[in-house]
Image (spheres, grey):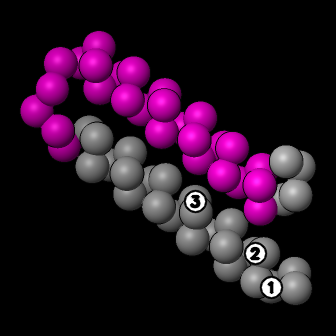
Amino acid sequence: MASSALIGILITFLVIILVLYLVQRLPIEARMRQIVQIIVIIIGIISLLKFLAVF
């Protein structure tokens, strides 16, 4: 059980990093890029908290 939660957290973390990298590569304005990064980070934190059974 603990190893499956750990794997899920690791995969979620890697997906967050990948999405943030891809957002950096987008040809959009810096302000819009920053907003998208904040949204991705918030969604990632909520997803990680679900794995930790906070929600």
Residues marked 2 and 3 touching at CB (< 8 Å): no
Query: In the drawing, what numbered circle is on residue 25?
Result: none
Residue 51 position (above or below residue 39) = below
Q: Residue 18 in magenta? A: no
Identify the amino acid type marked 1: Ser
Give the residue type that dot 3 points to.
Phe
- Tag count: 3
Towards the viewer: 42 or 30: 42
Residue where numbered disc 1 is placed: 3
Q: At x 49% / y 28%, what residue is drawn?
A: 38
Disc assigned to residue 13: 3
Please state, as top left, top right, bottom left or bottom right, where the N terminus lies in the image: bottom right
The residue beneath circle 2 is 6
Query: Does residue 44 show up magenta in the picture?
Result: yes
State which region is magenta: 25-51
For marks 2 and 3, give the CA distance: 11 Å
Callout 2 amino acid: Leu
Magenta stretch, main secondary structure, is: helix
> Would residue 17 appear left or right of 23 to someone viewing this image?
right
Neighbour class for label 2 at 10 Å: few (<14), some, many (≥20)? Answer: few
Residue 10's place in the image compared with 22, above or below, is below
Residue 33 position, x and y percent, is 29, 26
The x, y position of residue 21, in whole percent, is 32, 49
Quote the CA–CA distance across marks 2 and 1. Answer: 5 Å
33 relative to 8 in the view: left or right: left
- Residue 18 placement: quadrant: bottom left
